[in-house]
Image: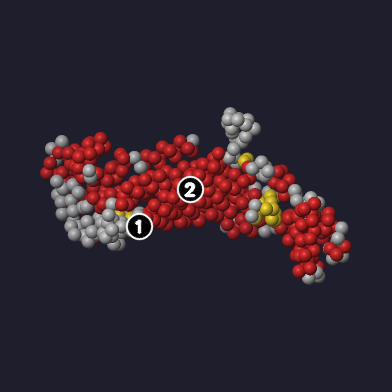
Amino acid sequence: MIERYTRAAMGRVWTEENRYRRWLEVESAASTVLAEFGIIPAAAAEAIATKASFSVERIHEIEAEVRHDVIAFTTTVAESLKKQGLDAESRWLHYGLTSNDIVDTAQSLLVKEASEQIRAGIVALMDVLKRRALEFKHTPTIGRTHGIHAEPTTFGLKLINWFAEIERDLKRFDFAAEDMRIGKLSGAVGTFGHLKPEHEEKICERLGLKPAPVATQVIQRDRHAAYISTLAILGSTLDKIALEVRHLQRTEVREAQEFFSEKQKGSSAMPHKKNPITSEQVCGLARVLRSNAQAAFEDVALWHERDISHSSVERVIFPDSTILADYLLAKTTDLIDRLLVYPERMKKNLESTGGLIFSGQLLLDLAEAGMMREDAYRLVQSHAMRSWKEDLVFREEVARDEKITALLTPEKLEKTFDYTRQLGNVDAIFRRVLGE
């Protein structure tokens, strides 16, 4: 259901039909405002707002001849008015505007429309991450650094960490989306050669946009680069989550895995395989989002008041990046929602090193009991390295060392190797993140 929604709803934003509809929306808003200022006849504005239409096929026909999409569009719209006997009214279409007044302002409307769906996807993922983080809040698991067992943590902490990062992604996204809620109707080089700033302000207000304080023929592309790069950062967070799931699903780890249906198959050759295909898709497609950010950076620098080098790029990266971000959010939300978690395997892995993961706690306890820290480090490390090399039980080895037992009673040693001692602040961390 999530996939079907993503592919249909977000895809519709970037159809040619919707793009031209947004162009007509800008044309109509401009005509209405100019009529209010007495610049064009009210009848013309009314005709453009209520009678004007277009055909994508006709736009294509004209564009094939004139090789200019906006001229093809305005010609098609004017034709639609003339067919209704509104020849006089049609000549006021696009009055005082340049092509990019329409294209850039309409693109902001498209980005706004796409952003609403992306934001909903981010919030949906946050809800799932929060729910599952609370579900496994106190489920102990081994924490790893450099891929090596480090100290105990909980699976809930792993999830709430992802939640906090997505929350930061949402703040960055909201700022970038708001920065893109901008319109521009200041003419060929941004000087208001034919309209006035107050006209632009009213047109933008009518469209739910803010006017660009200053522009050339185009809205400056630092805004666009910031928006696409924010999607790339969001994709990197999803990549991070999916990569961890892939590691957790490894045969040697098996602490969690993607949902695997009864009819699903993992390999054409090996019937036993359960591959993390969703996570791998997320990791792979996040690379495309990051590469699109590089293209957006290249669009910032344009010749003089504007060239067209950015236009073709944006026709690819804006649909692709917003559709991908929406799709990856849906995939990751479903991944976490149905993630299979194995607490018993986590406990088994936690205990698999015979207590080696408590070497740091033992070091602190010996220092607290009176041993010099350097001496304690050497003593604990010698037992740790020997236990690791010879596959001994670290906990048992240190319990036989008289230098250690002289300072730590059996009861204190038992406390040294109690993982709940190191997890006493889990609730405090959750309160920091959730404020609850």
Q: Is residue 54 above or below residue 105?
A: above
| Amino acid tagged 1 | Val
- Residue tagged 2: 287
Residue, x 15% and y 36% (percent of image)? 83
Q: At which x and y percent is residue 246?
A: 59, 44
Mark toward the start of the polypeptide (1 vs 2): 2
Number of callouts in the render? 2
Residues 287 and 370: in front is: 287
Rendering quarter of residue 21? top left
Asked which quadrant contains residue 173, the reply is bottom left
**From the viewer's perspective, is 417 left or right of 140?**
right
Give the CA separation, mark 1 to mark 2.
Answer: 21 Å
Residue lying furthest left: 88
User: Dividing the picture into quarters, in which one does residue 6 lie?
Assistant: top left
Relative to residue 56, is residue 376 drawn left or right?
Answer: right
Using the rendered image of the protein, determine whether residue 215 is visible from the camera's viewpoint. yes
- Mark 2 falls on what kind of element? helix
| Residue at x 57% of width, y 47% of height | 243
* Numbered mark located on residue 331 in the image: none
Q: Which residue is labeled 1 in the image?
A: 300
Task: Say which element carries label 1.
Answer: loop
